[in-house]
Amino acid sequence: MADVTTQKPTSLQDLARAQTSAPTATKILAENVDFYYSAFHALKTINIVIPDRQVTALIGPSGCGKSTFLRTLNRMNDLIDGTRLTGKITLDGEDLYDKRVDVVDLRKRVGMVFQKPNPFPMSIYDNIAYGPRIHGLTNRKKLNEIVERTLRGSALWEEVKDKLKASAFALSGGQQQRLCIARTLAVEPEVILMDEPCSALDPNSTFRIEQLMEDLKKDYTIVIVTHNMQQAARVSQRTGFFLRGEMKEFGDTDQIFTSPKQKDTEDYVSGKFG
């Protein structure tokens, strides 16, 4: 394996200057994050400021660490034996890896939409109501309100309002993915993580999901991993480029795609590798 030079830590002031000139609040801050799968050093000194109520895209070739980093943001990697994280990740200033953090509550605050739609084997209604019920809500009227509100929020209500008791598996792939987004919204998260949410979808469904992200960023912080650079350019305000476990460059999306500062970034976005 080629030797990889560890990225030099970046000061918080430098990270802040990497943001747009318009003031915006920081939602998630990663400082000098290293991550290991047993002996394998998967992430190397990652520093990133993720702004509130914007879309941040993570791009890079397969195996570069972007999905691993995404999963550190709601501790999904905790489910894998032998993993270890050093450094610090905060959500609204709270250390996500503090021993006092309730991981169930964290995953409520930081929801996740996966690459392949994964509706539960139950009705459309029960898919949405599942999360609130798990968290103790039994009032039918409130559940009805949540189901309608989140299905509207995921641009699916008009398509399914007359068949809420039908199986979620009867929906198309694109509809299933929007259902999974609605299911995430039902527990009122603050952050939505999306791991290649359109990779299994046709162009029309992809367009619908991208429109949905544009609407959702008004109320939620969104972090998306995508191999589709055109998608990253369309939907995000910030982009981070990962390569061999390092974040080579992070900044405004327009800058990353039109005037990258790093040669590796330029080569990747211009299609020379990846």
Image: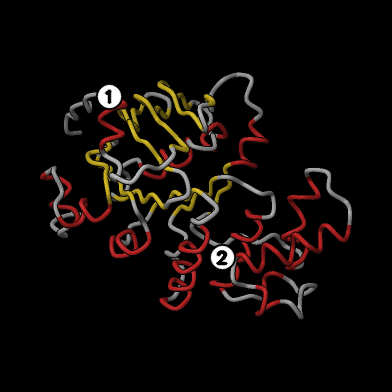
Q: Is residue 242 left or right of residue 265?
A: right
Image: 96 above or below 189: above
Image: 46 above or below 178: above
Name the amino acid type tagged 2. Answer: Gln
Give residue 245's quadrant in the image: top left
Q: Residue furthest top?
A: 99
* Residue beneath disc 1: 11
Q: Is residue 154 left or right of residue 227?
A: right
Tell me the crowding category of disc 1: few under 14, some 14 to 19, or many 20 or more residues within 10 angstroms, Cα based: few
Q: Is residue 14 left or right of residue 181?
A: left
User: What distance separates the C-alpha of mark 1 from that of mark 2?
Assistant: 38 Å
Q: Is residue 127 left or right of residue 236?
A: right
Location of residue 160 in the rendering, given as x and y in whole percent from the top left corner: 70, 77
The local secondary structure at tag 2 comes to helix
Location of residue 112 in the rendering, given as x and y in whole percent from the top left corner: 55, 49
* Foreground disc of the pair 1, 2: 1
Specify how the rendered protein is coloured: secondary structure
Q: Nearer the viewer, residue 130 or 223?
A: 223
Name the amino acid type tagged 1. Answer: Ser
Image: 156 above or below 76: below
* Residue beneath disc 2: 177
Location of residue 264 in the rendering, given as x and y in whole percent from the top left corner: 14, 45
